[in-house]
Image (spheres, rainbow, N blue to C red):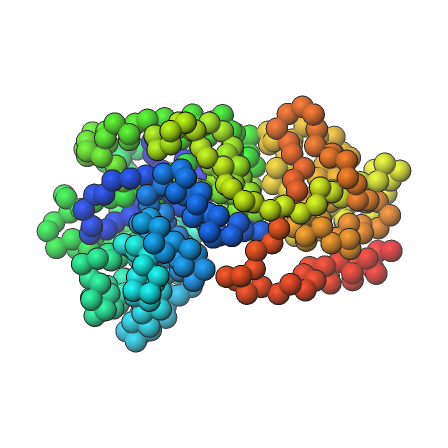
Amino acid sequence: MGWVSARDRVNFWLVCLLCMLCSVSGIGVNWGTQSSHSLPPDIIVNLLKDNGFQRVKLFDADYGTLKALGKSGIEVMVGIPNDMLASVGGSMKAAEKWVAKNVSAHITSNNVNIRYVAVGNEPFLETYNGSYLNITYPALRNIQSALVKAGLGSQVKVTVPLNADVYASSSGYPSGGDFRADIHDLMLMIVNFLSKNGFGNLPIIVGEIGWPTDGDRNADVEYARRFNQGFMSHISGGRGTPMRPGPIDAYLFSLIDEDDKSSAPGNFERHWGIFTFDGEAKYPLNLGTTNSGALVPAKGVKYLERKWCVMKPSARLDDPQVEPSVSYACGLADCTSLGYGTSCGNLDARGNISYAFNSYFQKNNQLEVACKFPNISMITKTDPTPTAGNCKFEIMIQPYYESAGRDLSVPRSLWTWFMFLFIFC
């Protein structure tokens, strides 16, 4: 399959990771944390172990996440966000400090099995307009040097996650591909740095591969099941590609849905998980790692009360407060399941409005003020989820604050909502 634009990324998602380490066994998965209500890290780690994941790819080096992975035996890839590349690339001291805090300390104190450091996250993506072209390679060199200085050079390897748009093909097929003209020389420098033995044997890891389940008419549960099961069945037999017929190292994208991810590339961006935000399996998927041949859901998940915010039955659809209220709710919550071909795409107008209100209400921990849309909303204990179809009006999980050190006070968006009420009431 060829490469895709951001607009078409719903159809395929693949990131190549150039690295120095030889091929390793075991299925991996991406663990993203851009969620308004994250599951506690210990629950996620148990979810990983219960489902036989032996490797996990992180996008940062969060302390609580890494601490939970301690003594789990799971092989870990930590990430340096793009906004930190200038710092570690411009200062060897900064690189050494980052390695000491985010790698050495966790290996020695928490027994975390860190094996890779991902320098940046798709830093050469065309939509970044060259923002990271001049700082990625210096960051890569400095982090590698810092790992060597820390005595971890043989244990922890550096890598650069790259989107498939780093290459172009004159023929339209991968066999006719080469690096994009604007990054061609830079990519050769990076490849030379990572391999002093020539390019032919440089291992390539599929860092992200998967299919989203909602937010677009092509983002469908059945499509996702077929794609991921087909991929798992292919690699479980040790089959690779015609050019590289051996085993493939790959990380599924992704473990759980993330409702705080940017939806700029498409509404499907928040629905890549093989598990829902609360750790429920979305569809049957045999990873070949469990006795049942099915995904094992998260255990010990705690939810908020069974109550929802919906549109009042007495409220009129033509009430002038409806449009700005829905716009506000969707702007600060998650309405990506509404729309043509999505899981909640068949709701009527009242259903759409209620879905938006409830999404905002749940995201704000069911605070009463979060269901005070001017004379058009109400709290109910009757589940508004339709009896037919896949649409679900969610109940949010209890917030977890420990690792992030978040403020338990009223969210800032609610103070804005007070202003909104004052203006429109």
Q: In which quadrant will I find the C terminus?
A: bottom right
Horizontal and vertical percent for residue 266? 53, 42
The image quadrant that residue 168 belongs to is: top left
Horizontal and vertical percent for residue 341? 59, 29
Horizontal and vertical percent for residue 300? 54, 44
The image quadrant that residue 278 belongs to is: top right
Q: Is residue 311 visible?
A: yes
Q: Is residue 106 left or right of residue 152?
A: right
Q: Is residue 401 left or right of residue 42?
A: right
Residue at 44%, 32% in the rendered image: 295
Q: In which quadrant will I find the N terminus?
A: top left
Q: Is residue 293 left or right of residue 198?
A: right
Residue at 61%, 31% in the rendered image: 343
Q: Is residue 152 above or below residue 376?
A: below
Q: Residue furthest left?
A: 197
Residue at 30%, 54% in the rendered image: 113
Q: Is residue 218 visible?
A: no
Q: Is residue 17 above or below residue 406?
A: above
Q: Residue furthest right?
A: 314
